Amino acid sequence: MEVRAGERLAWLLLCSLLCVDSVLGKYVKGIVNTKEDWVFLTRFCFLTDFGRLDFRFRYPKSRCCQNILLYFDDSSQWPAVYKRPEKQNCYQKEAVLRPENNQVINLTTSYTWSGCVVEGDGDEEVLSCVGGRSFRSVRERWWYIALSKCGGEGLRLEYEMKLTNGQSFWTQHFSADEFGILETDITFLIIFSLVFILSCYFAYNLKGRQLLHTTYKMFMTAAGVEVLSLLFHCVYWGLYARDGVGNGSLKLLGKLLFSVSFLVFLLMLILLGKGFTVTRARISHSGSVKLSIYMTVYTITYVILFIYEAEFFDPGEVLYAYDSPAGYGLMGLQLLAYVWFCYAVLVSLKRYPEKQPFYVPFFTTYTLWFFAVPVMALIANYGIPRWAREKIVNGIQLGIHLYAHIVFLVITRPSAANKNFPYHVRTSQIGILLSSPKGGEGGESFPHHAYGNGSFVGDSQPNFTELFSIQSDPVKTVEETVACKGPEVPRNSEQKIITTAADLTSILPPPPIPPRLAARSPPLPPRLPSFTEYFSMQGGGGFGTKA
């Protein structure tokens, strides 16, 4: 396959060194050996004018004569025969085909268009059929290829098929429902990479101000794993665009990483809703247990979904991952997470109303995100045509994830103009809060302090401007940090600063009264204005020395 310069550059971007030997088109091969008289082989979504099937079939002449059947997705064709109890007879399944549309390829030497010839294979003669077929329709259609021999003793066939759409690098090897997936994944890979780089830059600034909390690190993890997921998907689709086969392990790994990114982000949202690193330093023991159970159930359900998709999805039907018991279970868990999220945010706002600038936009934007996933699944199952489902769902799903990441990046940007910034307690202060001997509410809750833009005025040095303050009224306030040695001093619930207030006017002794001058003392010599006295000596008896 000859690749143009721009396409070659794109391929190099997708790690072309991992490619295997190239062939043209979606490539499928296999061996059929069954007692059934009708079996499904593969499916492909062809374009309106550029669909092409190239085939090579071999089977013993003694098993003649077998047919290749070409069904399309009209309700009177494939849906009318596949897994329909009323049409289990092979003859009934062949009867729906239209001979004038060349939907039957008879694998015999008498049918010229099949390209069959008799070849010797040891002591047995075989029919070897090599040929092709073009597909034209009014719109993109799914075509289903089956093998039949009605009334025979079973089927035995070796087959190789290449299915293509045009000659473009971006379409030739893709089914029509997969058009644009590679370009979409490359675009989102670039955007998510920028999001991850920007989050690293923000994290550097937050760390310098001692505001890089665990929840922000979870966001960075979710964004980084999302980038890896898209990278593996791009490599898979790049390989598929090159040889029509791809590497299924790369696609599976990309899906697993996509799920991991989703789970980490979901856990981060629930933790933020409960106030972790925003209004409290840790989650209660019961809350941690509930979160662990929930995330374990969610992870197991995801694993079941992957197993179900790999083992139980019928290749003869165009199915979506959420169109399964495990998929509906995931949608239910998503709605349960939203209920939990709502309750957690309301409790946090009730206890810390000064955090409304963060929690109100946070709750509003991520309410849309929580409902976007199940709504997308329902629309994909019932509202999107099957010949366009995969590419549309792929774009919508990535768009939902990008929306969630960009919103969080905006509301947590370390800028003095950001009124929604959630963090106000420095990471160096959390250790003091967690060292509470009581270990209760006083040790896990942050002090009531709304986010102030002054946190971003200085540099990474601690702020010492609030350690000491003296009031001008008769009551003096002394603020001091708890000393490391000496007698134990009672600590307040915040474990940071002890404030002592006392009326010192009744404790301090009165100021001393200056002594009165003697009546006979000579008056002090007057000072001359505008002159400096360098030397001055006085003595008894009125004697003096002048210089």
Image: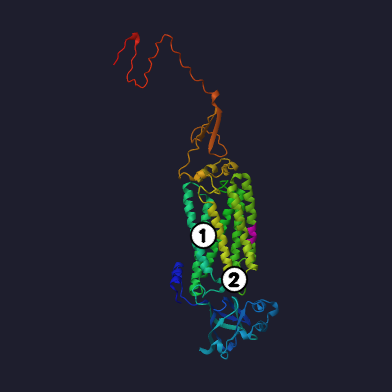
Q: Decide: is 346 above or below 471.
A: below
Q: Position of residue 118 (x, y in %)?
A: 53, 90
Secondary element under disc 2, as helix, strand or loop, is loop
| Tag count | 2
Q: Amino acid at mark 2?
A: Ala
**N-terminal of the two: label 2 or label 1?**
1
Q: Is residue 161 magenta?
A: no
Q: Residue furthest right?
A: 86
Q: Residues within 10 Å of mark 1 (few under 14, many from 20)?
A: many
Figure quadrant of residue 339: bottom right
Q: Residue at x 48, y 55 (%)?
A: 198
Q: How is the image coloured?
A: rainbow
Quarter holding the C terminus is top left
Of 63 and 433, the residue lying toward us: 433
Residue receiving disc 1:
225
Mark number displayed over residue 420: none
Q: Give the extent of the magenta segment.
A: 330-335
Q: Amino acid at mark 1?
A: Val
Q: Residues within 10 Å of mark 2 (few under 14, many from 20)?
A: some
Residue receiving disc 2:
388
The reply to whether dot 2 and dot 1 touch (C-beta < 8 Å) is: no
Q: Residue at x 45, y 13 (%)?
A: 516
**Side of 281 relative to 516 (left or right):** right
Magenta segment, principal secondary structure? Answer: helix
- Which of the two discs, 2 and 1, sits closer to the camera? 2
Q: Is residue 292 visible?
A: no
